[in-house]
Amino acid sequence: MNRSFCWILLILLLQGFPRGITAQTANDTTASQQSGAAADDPSQFFTRIELFNELQHNPKDYYWNQTTLRTIVKLGKRFTTRLDIPYGYNTLSSPEGEKHNGLGDISFRLLGFKLIDDPKSAITLSMEVSLNTAESKLLGTGKNMIIPLLSYTRTLKKPGNLVSVVLQQTNSFSGDETRENVSFTKLQGVYIKVWSKKMWTVVAPVIYIDYVHGGTSMNLEGRMVYATAPRSNFWVQAGAGLYGDFLLRYQWAAQVGYRYFLFRNMNWKRK
């Protein structure tokens, strides 16, 4: 049994810990839940499964393609967990024998918590961890990382539209000693414009502040989402790198994805 499989098995077991609980209807308070754009609002914790693929072209003239399976579980009115399992392909030249495709770095949210939740605004705090599970140096950072995250969401006058700011700090704490340490801040803005109950757009500028090499970088992303059914969404997304040379800054990116809500609205209670 290899290391990557052990990590996946352990995290899946941890994700499944809320046994003995059942779902019941409940209402989240921010307006995006009513508009159908719940999963694109950082303050919402709806239980769902997502599968998405992203193709990036790097300024150093190589391509990165990654497919990610994501599961999010809502626990009560204010708590959540999340698990991301990525499978990637990297065209960057490498020493002979280095894998170009395979499992990437698995990440999971230990716990997310809503500090404030009212009809007009929400503040959430979460702690996430990224594990050094990649099958080769081309597929991951080589580091275990801890990622605290804070978000603020505010609804606008028109029902369903909102703005959000997400602040994320990433620091490596162990892993391959031959690989560079990781330390950066990610600041993301989110604007959701609802066109109808079945369609909305998301605009998200992202700024990275690199503490290892110094400097800032920026990407700009836009997403169009269509609700194919009350419990399912399909989206397409495009992104452009505006400036900087940070690793996560790309030249351009394209993404397609699908999500399925296990429950339309849900709250957990113990039997």
Image (spheres, rainbow, N blue to C red):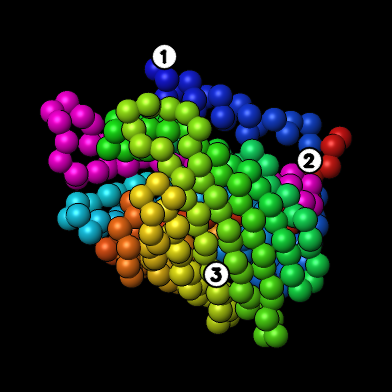
Identify residue type, mark 2. Answer: Thr
Mark identifier at residue 1:
1
- Identify the residue under disc 3: 190
Give neighbour class at mark 3: few <14, some 14-19, many 20+ (Cα, 10 Å).
Answer: many
Question: Marks 2 and 3: in contact by CB < 8 Å?
Answer: no
Q: Which sits earlier in the primary sequence, circle 1 or circle 3? A: 1
In percent of the image, x 66 and y 48: which residue is there?
A: 126
Q: Disc 3 vs disc 2: which is toward the camera?
A: 3
Q: Rounded to the nearest whole Å, what is the CA distance between mark 3 and mark 2?
A: 32 Å
Residue 234, percent from left and from top: 47, 63
Question: Marks 1 and 2: in contact by CB < 8 Å?
Answer: no
Residue 143, percent from left and from top: 42, 33
Helix, strand or loop for disc 3: strand
Q: Which sits earlier in the primary sequence, circle 3 or circle 2? A: 2
Instruction: State the extent of the magenta-drawn residues as a range.
Output: 73-102
In percent of the image, x 56 and y 74: which residue is there?
A: 192
Q: Quadrant of residue 162?
A: bottom right
Identify residue type, mark 3. Answer: Val
Q: Quadrant of the C terminus?
A: top right
Looking at the image, is 83 positioned above or below residue 41? above
Q: Rounded to the nearest whole Å, what is the CA distance between mark 1 and mark 3?
A: 41 Å
Identify residue type, mark 1. Answer: Met
